[in-house]
Amino acid sequence: MRCPFCAKLDNKVVDSRVSKDASVIRRRRQCQDCGQRFTTYERVEEMETYVVKKDGSREIYDRNKVKAGMLKALQKRPVSIDQVEEFLDSLEASFQERNLREIPVRALGEAVMKKLKELDAVAYVRFASVYRDFRELDEFMREVKDLLAARKDQPAGS
């Protein structure tokens, strides 16, 4: 494994942890040359899943693309990267369990919005405004009002 700091190949594993569902191994490594520590993730290479876009074209599902969209919405919000990684792991596991070779972009976006709604309301609205392509302030306000109404309907402590 190449060190991301100095690009040398000489490093050692200082800690390994298995994810809750045992599908990923997280390894902390230390470069023998520069001493910096970095993290790698090891997971089984699984069958490729394609995202079917609105225009009917297909592209290979890209975890990093979904993660980047979530992190953009979660910027400066109190949600950990581990929570995002756990969601992505469970999302990808559901693809495998259901033997999905293709997933509509709409279903993928809705899954992300559902999770963001659970994690952080502000991040949810940020993501929804881009994903649903709000063009008017009224659309944005309607989404916020729906979110507030749903929160009022929940029992206290939820």
Image (cartoon, rainbow, N blue to C red):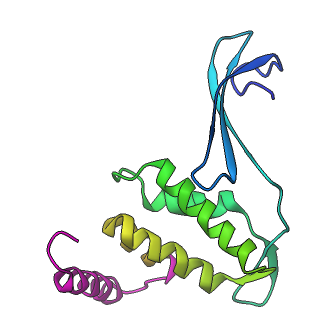
Q: How many marks?
A: 0
Q: Which of the 4 image quadrants contains residue 46?
A: bottom right
Q: Magenta segment range?
A: 131-158
Give the camera-side residue of 18 and 135.
18
Q: In the image, 2: left or right of 139?
A: right
Residue placed at 34% from the left, 64% from the top? 120
Residue 94 coordinates in the image, percent (x, y): 66, 73
Give the answer, above or below, for where 75 lies relative to 100.
above
Q: Which of the 4 image quadrants contains residue 99?
A: bottom right
Magenta segment includes 143: yes
Q: Which of the 4 image quadrants contains residue 106?
A: bottom right
Q: In the image, 49: left or right of 73?
A: right
Give the answer, above or below, for where 49 lies relative to 66.
below
Give the camera-side residue of 108 and 44.
44
Where the C terminus falls, by quadrant?
Answer: bottom left
Magenta segment includes 154: yes
Look at the magenta stretch and give its main secondary structure: helix
Residue placed at 42% from the left, 57% from the top? 74
Residue 107 coordinates in the image, percent (x, y): 61, 84
Residue 37 coordinates in the image, percent (x, y): 62, 22
Give the answer, above or below, for where 119 lies relative to 151.
above
Q: In the image, 102: left or right of 79?
A: right
Residue placed at 76% from the left, 18% from the top? 11
Residue placed at 60% from the left, 48% from the top? 19
Give the camera-side residue of 84 and 23.
23
Residue 42 coordinates in the image, percent (x, y): 74, 44
Where the N terminus falls, by quadrant?
Answer: top right
